[in-house]
Amino acid sequence: MRNRLLVLMMKVGDPASIERWAREGHLPTIRSVMERGCHGRLAGAERICEHGTATTVFSGTSADRHGYYYFRQLVPGTYRLTTFGADQAGSPPFWTRRDAFSGSVAVIDAPETAPVPGVRGHQLVNWCFHQPDLAIAPYASEPPELLAEVQRMYGEPPDILGDTANGTPEEDRRDLRRFLDSVRTKGELCRHVASLGDADLVIAAFDETHTASHRYWRYRPEAADGGAEDETLRHAIRSVYQATDREFGLLIEQAGEAADVVVVSLFGMQEQFPTEELNGALCRALGYQARREAAPGRLRPVDLARRVLPESLRVAISRRLPTHRQEELLADLFASGTDWQRTTAFSLPSLYTGFVRVNLRGREPAGIVDPADYDRVLGELEEDLRRMVDVESGEPVIESTVRAVDVFGGGPPVRLPDLFVEWKAGPKLLERVRHPRGEFGQRRPSFCPGSEETLEGFVAAAGPHVRGRGEIGAIAPIEFAPTALSLLGRNPTPDMPGTPHVGMLGAAAVIVG
């Protein structure tokens, strides 16, 4: 008998919330999978940033190989910033690789993927899934006629996933129904696509729990102010999880008892505010990144505007420009606003996680740091970061720093930042930071949600080939593809650094022949 696998995915499925609500009976489908099989966390040392996680999960290749860590990245060998997406990573999902899997598929909205011609079965991507990239990929299908069929049956996808802003309570109550309707429609669509063929692998991904968590975060009972009194809003996030759980149950019923089932979320959720301006000021304030002073008589119009217009006005003007023009200005300011001949390390523009590169000789165009001093510069940076405190509370502001070389080995990375900086999460915007050498801060940005994804997800599995029972600890993102292939009766490809998760599969993790 052939192996069959059903993967049920939420982009955001907070592990602690899932486990609590499953225990309390609010998520009976997920609870059943946990009780029949095993459960753990999607976690690991290589979980260093949000973007690229799905690429790692589905391709089985690590971030140092595919190089995707943010929607805006440094072009290797230059000081030029460019938009970046999964399509540029060059690490296709395992079900599109003939050397890994040749069975039939039904894939719906698997994040950071694109439909690939020649794959048996049906692929539908970006139909109703929030994309954090600047270059939004259109929804598409393979075969192409699948998209036309879906549009005929379900119309255009709901637009609720692009709306993470807080509205009025009345608007939020109204839109909760739209979230729930979106979940139900996605479930119907997934069951339809899965019914079109006898697929060996079905992947159905839902994202309403993600954007609903952002939208209704302030109302939850655990909020600092006690949340909303209105019970509908107070438990809105849980309601969207419950609706997703119901659709999971219908998909499991359709798949039948012979199929293995894996429930997985990529991220959790926590209280956290953007640190965009703090990231930008980080290396400059600490003396690592030197500002470029324009030579007298050689001011370009953009340089003159920077000198004459107040920064607040410049920011206000730039935010009214089209996104592509904002990115062009940001890239210009980054490249031309730094004196690279006096810079030892520099920060790449980002919203949350800080990305720092050493201005390394032989790697950067005007690198001044000798490779022999690479570790020393990183050590000094980390020590300076540890000395930074919140001006208001006096508490340290950095949660952790991670060196790419410590996670992935080898020498300094070509595409990844050298240092990933996580700021401490909290219930308020961090406005002023103090270091022994001075203070710097940030204003409240226009995009300022009070919640952000955590780098830990949820995993549960049950079925004929799942031998694990109870709590199995962490499964690393690079282990997911090898584990899925093992459940399908295939061996991981030699270029996959991860191995099938023994805690989930037991002896089934080893395939002979």
Image (spheres, grey):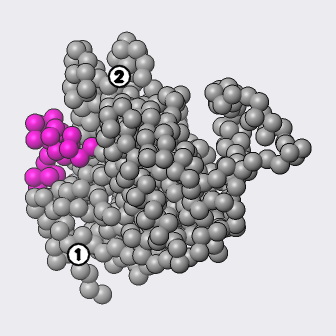
In this rendering, would 60 be left or right of 331?
A: left
The stretch drawn in magenta includes residue 18: yes
Instruction: Tell me if residue 132 comes above or below residue 406 in the rendering.
Output: above
The boundaries of the magenta stretch are 11-37
- Residue 39, located in which quarter of the rendered image? bottom left
In this rendering, would 399 be left or right of 107?
A: left
Taking depth in this image into account, of 36 and 278 the one nearest to the observer is: 278
Mark 2 in CB contact with mark 1 (< 8 angstroms): no
What residue sits right under mark 2 in the picture? 177
Taking depth in this image into account, of 51 and 298 the one nearest to the observer is: 298
Which residue is located at x 15 percent, y 35 percent?
Answer: 26
Residue 242 picture location, percent across and down: 23, 34
Residue 440 picture location, percent across and down: 50, 39
Kind of residue at badge 2:
Arg
Which residue is located at x 14 percent, y 52 percent?
Answer: 34
Rounded to the nearest angstrom, the CA distance separating label 2 from label 1 is 43 Å
Give the structural element (helix, strand or loop) at label 1: helix
In this rendering, would 366 be left or right of 299?
A: left
Residue 76 visible at all: yes
Residue 182 visible at all: no
